[in-house]
Amino acid sequence: MTQATLTRLEDRYPTRLGHAISPVPRAEPAVWGTAHDGPLGRSELRRFDDHGYLIRPGTVAADRLRPLQHELERLGAVLDDDPRVIREPGGGIRSVFAPHLLSDLVAEVVRLDSVLPIARQILGGDVYIHQARINMMPGFTGTGFYWHSDFETWHAEDGMAEIRAVSCSIALTDNYPYNGSLMLIPGSHQTFYPCVGATPEQHYETSLVRQEMGIPDQNTLVKEVDRAGIDQFTGPAGSALWFDANLLHGSGSNITPLPRSNVFLVFNSVDNQLADPFCGAAPRPEYLGARDPHATVAL
């Protein structure tokens, strides 16, 4: 499906509505490739298909971790008031967007044999970086992310038509159950949950700090957790969590002394080019939702 053929009438995942509507069954497969197309075996692909996520230890070697941690600190200091730097309400750095375009070290991670081939395998072909960021959750003050589906935002605010994107969160520090690690509702990627509420102009400026739009209602969350429970991404630095764009996930705040940081890469299929945002607002900046695969390094 090309951008030229997309119309508002072809919106299969309506959201940001004035009233609640029923959930929408997913139309696309979660896994587009086969075991012959990359490093993941049949059982891993089946698990991703069933649960919507997969954990891969040792994705980034130990000797790369320290330089990446230093790079994280360097980018935060150099960019300072750059709009790509998102700060916590208390002033600390929360996220740095588009680090793969600012740092050769991060760009190298994108192309690792333990990263890029998996993205291509899951999405069934060529991919590009739709969004990338470094997330920082410092000890004591790091705030969480409320439950949401990333695809809901990318569909509504970026114009991503199909659920054909996958995220890779690579831990730069150890993830424990108690330092704000990501929580996931397994199997929730198979259903799209429309959200209520119009999207204000430049809403992204506040939503990157506090998720208030595009979040499922509490009744939906109760039903989903009753159905499948909650899993959590824990493990040593260098581990990677791969998860489907439509999987419901979130994280609590970090009140421990143990900081948590990660490199977050979103791969989108080159066949899933962005259209006009389905919420009717203006497109977000390129560093939040890349609209031209070739301008952001097709892979």
Image: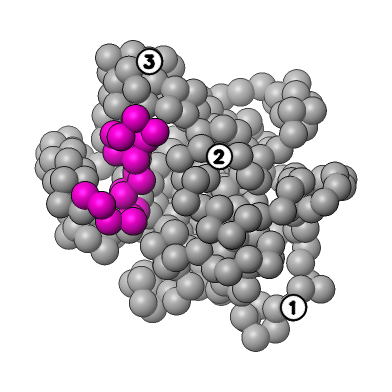
Question: Which is in the foreground here, disc 1 or disc 3?
Answer: 3
Q: Residues within 10 Å of mark 3 (few under 14, many from 20)?
A: some
The answer to which image quadrant residue 67 occupies is: top left
Instruction: Please tell me which of labels 1 and 2 falls first in the chain.
Output: 1
Q: Residue at x 56, y 24 (%)?
A: 231
Residue 168 visible within the image:
yes
Q: Which residue is mark 2?
A: 211
Q: Which residues are the magenta region?
A: 80-97
- The local crowd at label 1, few if under 14, some if 14 to 19, many if 20 or more residues have their Cα within 10 Å, is few
- Return the residue at label 1: 7
SS state under label 1? loop
Q: Amino acid at mark 1?
A: Thr
Q: Which quadrant holds the N terminus?
A: bottom right
Question: Is residue 130 at least partly visible in the picture?
Answer: no
Residue at figure coordinates x 29%, y 34% from the top left: 92
Magenta stretch: includes residue 83: yes
Element type where label 2 sits in the image: loop
Please state which amino acid type lies under the numbered disc 2.
Answer: Gln
- Residue linked to disc 3: 255
- Which quadrant of the view contains residue 99? bottom left
Q: Amino acid at mark 3?
A: Ile
Q: Which tag, 2 or 3, sits closer to the chain's start?
A: 2
Q: Nearer the viewer, residue 74 or 11?
A: 74
